[in-house]
Image (cartoon, rainbow, N blue to C red):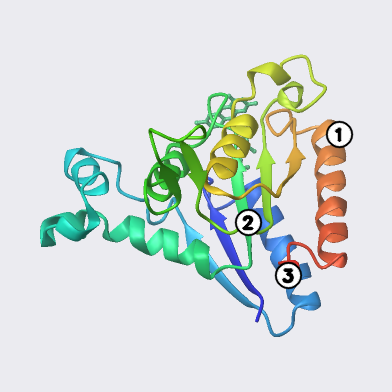
């Protein structure tokens, strides 16, 4: 069974470039995985809770001593992590907002990066941090209003979305991350058309190679 988890984080439901690309990738993926299952999580329609004091107390408590209230505080985190564990591959629509992640995607990251659950911590060890998730392909479909934020562009060093996602996913074990990028969305001219066409071709090529798909064990 091939199980694809699709995560949306654009604030827009209409006219969204990242939703257009995720839709395109899912459609192409389905033609190559007719028996595959697609699970969609829309972080804008259902934003994850922000991490607060009860969450932090629960996450860092001894799991054997968690109270019912603590288990309750971690319920969303448990569900989101289980969804990742069930997936064979993950697709994420991730717009650049203010040089980084949309808040709803950051809230999601804060729910899934959890000590003892997705990463281990041992203060005595030479390497204190251990990723706990099994690696699986992650494709990030991203769009920026200004094309100069993309790799090779004059403002690429100000794009904190890509290094943030690569770092945080690698930290929990998801080291196989591919980016497909669109730039110039704010200009609405031929540069956007060219960038979008290239991204759509890249998406079709990924799907034609069977990606994203788990490598057989
Ligand atoms: C709140 C907000 C912040 C944005 N910040 C940036 C930015 O820092 N740099 C940039 O190039 N584009 C920025 N944009 C433009 C978006 O990256 C662009 O519109 C992108 O296509 C949004 O993704 P979507 O089409 O899937 O909604 C911003 C857009 C919004 C709504």
Residue designated by label 3 = 27
Residue designated by label 2 = 135
**Alpha-carbon neighbours of circle 3 within 10 Å: few (<14), some, or many (≥20)?**
some
Q: Please give the label number shown on residue 79.
A: none
Mark before the other along the chain sequence, 1 or 2: 2
* Callout 1: SS: helix
Which of the 4 image quadrants contains residue 169? top right
Query: Above or below — where is 53 with respect to 98?
Result: below
**Alpha-carbon neighbours of circle 1 within 10 Å: few (<14), some, or many (≥20)?**
few
Residue closer to the observer: 82 or 171: 171
Residue designated by label 1 = 190
| Residue at image point 64% right, 18% down | 158
- Real-space Cα distance between discs 1 and 3? 26 Å
Disc nearest the viewer among 1 and 2: 2
Mark before the other along the chain sequence, 3 or 2: 3
- Real-space Cα distance between discs 1 and 2? 38 Å
Q: Is residue 91 left or right of residue 48?
A: right
Does the Cβ of the disc 2 residue fall within 8 Å of ligand 1? no
Quarter of the image where the C terminus is located: bottom right
Quarter of the image where the N terminus is located: bottom right
């Amino acid at each position: 069974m091939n199980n694809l988890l699709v995560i949306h984080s654009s604030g827009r439901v209409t006219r969204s470039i990242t939703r257009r690309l995720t839709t395109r990738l899912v459609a192409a993926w389905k033609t190559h995985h007719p028996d595959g299952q697609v699970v969609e999580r829309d972080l804008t329609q259902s934003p994850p809770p922000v991490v607060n004091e009860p969450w932090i107390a629960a996450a860092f408590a001894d799991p054997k001593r968690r109270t019912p209230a603590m288990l309750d505080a971690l319920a969303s985190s448990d569900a989101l992590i289980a969804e990742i564990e069930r997936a064979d591959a993950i697709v994420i629509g991730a717009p650049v907002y203010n040089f980084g992640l949309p808040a709803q995607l950051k809230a999601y990251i804060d729910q899934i990066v959890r000590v003892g659950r997705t990463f281990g911590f041992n203060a005595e060890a030479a390497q204190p941090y251990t990723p706990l998730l099994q690696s699986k392909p992650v494709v990030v479909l991203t769009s920026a209003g200004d094309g100069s934020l993309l790799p090779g562009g004059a403002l690429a060093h100000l794009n904190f979305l890509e290094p943030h996602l690569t770092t945080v996913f690698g930290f929990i074990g998801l080291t196989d991350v591919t980016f497909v990028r669109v730039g110039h969305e704010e200009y609405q001219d031929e540069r956007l058309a060219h960038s979008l066409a290239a991204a759509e071709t890249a998406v079709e090529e990924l799907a034609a190679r069977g990606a994203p798909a788990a490598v057989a064990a």
